[in-house]
Image (cartoon, rainbow, N blue to C red):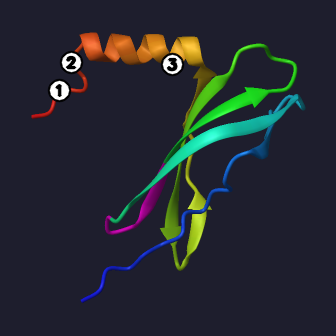
Amino acid sequence: MQRKTFEHPFREPPCNVTFRYPDGHVLTGTILAAKTRIHRWKIPYASRIELMKFNRIKEKHIRFVYARRVSRRWVFASQTTWTFSVAITRTAIREAEKMEMFAVD
């Protein structure tokens, strides 16, 4: 039996990104680089890490995002996600490593 292959739901960089906040604030920028992985579980998921540069903000940011495949179409599933500066992301990963969160059982 042949495994199903899925195209991922994300646009390839460089591409524009827009964040709209409930208070009306809008933040725009560009996704500079990204790595996407398809997870073939009961409900397929696509996870992705992106490097982005927002307009009017000096530092670059990293975002972790995901989508799930439902009825032959991809649905954005990142109700909770991570979008912080590279420095904050690096610090969080180092703290997680110190706490042995990446240890494989």
- The circle drawn on residue 103 is 1
Q: Amino acid at mark 2?
A: Glu
Which is more N-terminal, label 2 or label 3?
A: 3
Was residue 42 drawn as part of the magenta stretch in this picture? Answer: yes
**Visible residue check, residue 70:** yes
Which is more N-terminal, label 1 or label 3?
A: 3
The picture places residue 24, in percent across and down from the top left corner, at: 90, 32
89 or 24, which is in the foreground? 89
11 or 71, which is in the foreground? 11
Res 33 → quadrant: top right
Was residue 17 drawn as part of the magenta stretch in this picture? Answer: no
Query: Do the residues bearing badges 1 and 2 touch, measured as CB atoms within 8 Å?
Result: yes
Q: Residues within 10 Å of mark 1 (few under 14, many from 20)?
A: few
CA gap, disc 3 and disc 1: 19 Å
Q: Which stretch did the figure color magenta?
A: 41-47
Q: Residues within 10 Å of mark 2 (few under 14, many from 20)?
A: few
